């Protein structure tokens, strides 16, 4: 692990609401990106790609270096398996946020597995941001996208989760449904100067925050930039202005 500068929410220019996904192929590449970003990012998301490349070890090292860690592993299995997985992840002390699929049995199991360890915030993934109404029809849902998101937000509240993951376009709906203290995390965030990539329901950071998001996830506009640190600071400035 590089000798990362210890960071905190007041790091110069950083915004603790900005989540940077380390969607890179190897731990070595991820560590190099963290080093380039320096104090511009305080919260990193580790997804399934890095899970296969010592994602848990990387999470622990980044946590010890002072960063906040979001394990976006979208747990989805029978209740007993999810409960045990949530318990093991919580016990490792390597994350601040953990995602599960927003299905009642899965969410209830994750809450049991966490066993009151409130330092780990559980987030229910409602509908993936790559999906649109036509995709839901193809999957077999008979609800509109907004109706399905609203139902899953209500179920997340009832299950005792700390928040949900929704697209920026459903952030206002999630905020109205869950109330002011609930976490509303929005992937699919792209500044106006970047492309939408594979996000079907994207929005700018300012739009997401104005709609009610508590956190925004922004990846490729930062990691693919010629100067990732400068791109991250530019987005943080846009968020501060919002």
Image: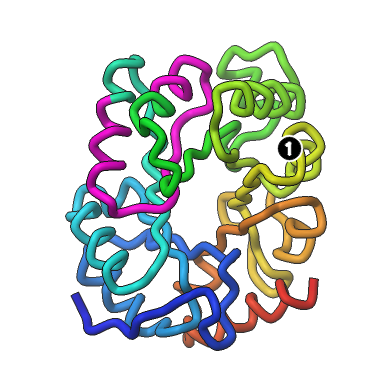
Determine the residue positioned at 23% across, 66% down. Answer: 61
Determine the residue positioned at 39% across, 58% down. Answer: 69
In percent of width and height, residue 170 lies at: 74, 40
- Look at the image and give the residue range highlighted in magenta: 84-109
Give the quadrant of the N terminus: bottom left
93 magenta-colored = yes
> Compared to 153, does 139 lie above or below?
above
Viewer-closest of 204 and 88 = 88
Q: Is residue 35 left or right of residue 3?
A: right
Q: Quadrant of residue 100?
A: top left
- Is residue 200 in sight in this rendering? no
Q: Quadrant of residue 109?
A: top left
Q: Quadrant of residue 195?
A: bottom right
**Numbered-mark total:** 1
Q: Mark 1 sits on what residue?
A: 174
120 magenta-colored = no
Label 1 secondary element:
helix
How dense is the environment of label 1, judged by Cα within 10 Å: few (below 14), some, or many (20 and up)?
many
Q: In the image as oriented, which residue stretches furthest toward the front?
A: 116
Determine the residue positioned at 71% across, 72% down. Answer: 239
In percent of width and height, residue 190 lies at: 65, 63
> Compared to 131, does 152 lie above or below?
above
Determine the residue positioned at 36% across, 55% down. Answer: 46
> Compared to 39, does 118 lie above or below?
above
């Amino acid at each position: 692990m590089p000798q990362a500068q210890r960071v905190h929410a007041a790091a110069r220019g950083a915004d603790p609401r900005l989540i940077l996904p380390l969607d890179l192929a190897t731990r070595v590449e991820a560590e190099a990106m963290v080093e380039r970003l320096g104090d511009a990012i305080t919260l990193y998301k580790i997804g399934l790609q890095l899970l296969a490349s010592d994602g848990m070890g990387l999470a622990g090292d980044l946590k010890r270096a002072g960063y906040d860690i979001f394990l976006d592993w979208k747990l989805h299995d029978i209740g007993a398996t999810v409960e045990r997985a949530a318990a093991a992840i919580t016990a490792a002390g390597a994350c601040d946020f953990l995602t599960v699929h927003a299905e009642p049995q899965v969410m209830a199991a994750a809450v049991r597995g966490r066993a009151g360890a409130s330092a780990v915030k559980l987030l229910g993934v409602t509908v993936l941001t790559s999906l649109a109404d036509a995709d839901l029809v193809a999957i077999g849902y008979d609800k509109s996208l907004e109706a399905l998101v609203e139902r899953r937000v209500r179920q997340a509240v009832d299950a005792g989760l700390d928040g949900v993951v929704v697209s920026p376009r459903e952030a206002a709906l999630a905020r109205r449904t869950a109330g002011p203290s609930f976490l509303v995390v929005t992937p699919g965030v792209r500044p106006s100067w970047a492309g939408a990539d594979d996000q079907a329901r994207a929005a700018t950071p300012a739009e997401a925050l104005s709609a009610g998001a508590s956190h925004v996830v922004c990846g490729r506009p930062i990691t693919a930039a010629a100067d990732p640190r400068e791109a991250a600071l530019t987005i943080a400035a846009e968020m501060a202005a919002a």
